[in-house]
Image (tube, helix red, strand yellow):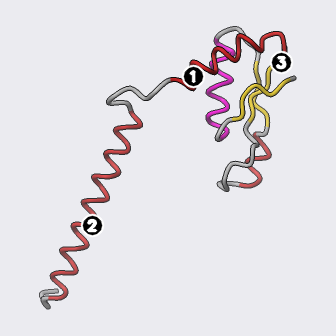
Amino acid sequence: MKIIYRAADILEAHIVAGMLNAEGIEAEVAGFYQQGAVGELAPQDFARVMLVDERDTERAERVIAAYESREPEPGSEQEDREQNSSGRLAGWLLVAALLLMLLSWGIL
């Protein structure tokens, strides 16, 4: 077996392995239990995608290159989450500022 991709986390490793398997390239995720042992610490090179047959290396590299070159589409779910979390943070900051202002005036 050959390491074909080093992922940022286990989720990404499973995504890449799934893409390879969908293309008929047999791949497996390695390092699943190792990353679980360290929890949410910074990646330690645990999440890896392994090729079962090294003869598929060239095809796998093309699939991975296409995956890495993609950019999130405008209005994608990730972009929406980022905007929503920014909006929520701004709302909470406004509420905190209003409470502090009311406390300083002796209203509360």
List the residue tagged with mark 2.
Answer: 93
List the residue tagged with mark 3.
Answer: 52
Q: Is residue 10 magenta?
A: yes
- The kind of secondary structure element at disc 1 is helix
Neighbour tally class for label 2: few under 14, some 14-19, many 20 plus, Cα within 10 Å: few
What's drawn in magenta, residue-wise?
A: 9-22
Q: Are marks 2 and 1 in contact (CB under 8 Å)?
A: no
| Mark positioned earlier in the residue sequence (1 or 3) | 3
Q: Is residue 68 left or right of residue 13?
A: left
The quarter of the displayed image where residue 29 is located: top right
Q: CA distance from mark 3 to mark 2?
A: 51 Å
List the residue tagged with mark 1.
Answer: 67
Q: What's under tag 1, amino acid-wise?
A: Tyr
Q: Closer to the observer: label 1 or label 3?
A: 1
Name the disc covering residue 42, or none: none
- The kind of secondary structure element at disc 3 is loop
Q: Residue, x 43% and y 29% (percent of image)?
A: 72
The quarter of the displayed image where residue 20 is located: top right
Q: CA distance from mark 1 to mark 3?
A: 20 Å
Give x and y (percent) for residue 41.
67, 56
Q: Residue, x 79% and y 39% (percent of image)?
A: 31
Q: Residue, x 53% and y 23% (percent of image)?
A: 69
Q: Is residue 54 left or right of residue 67?
A: right
Q: Residue, x 65% and y 14% (percent of image)?
A: 62
Predominant SS of the magenta segment: helix
| Mark positioned earlier in the residue sequence (2 or 1) | 1
Give x and y (percent) for residue 90.
26, 59
Q: What's under tag 2, amino acid-wise?
A: Leu
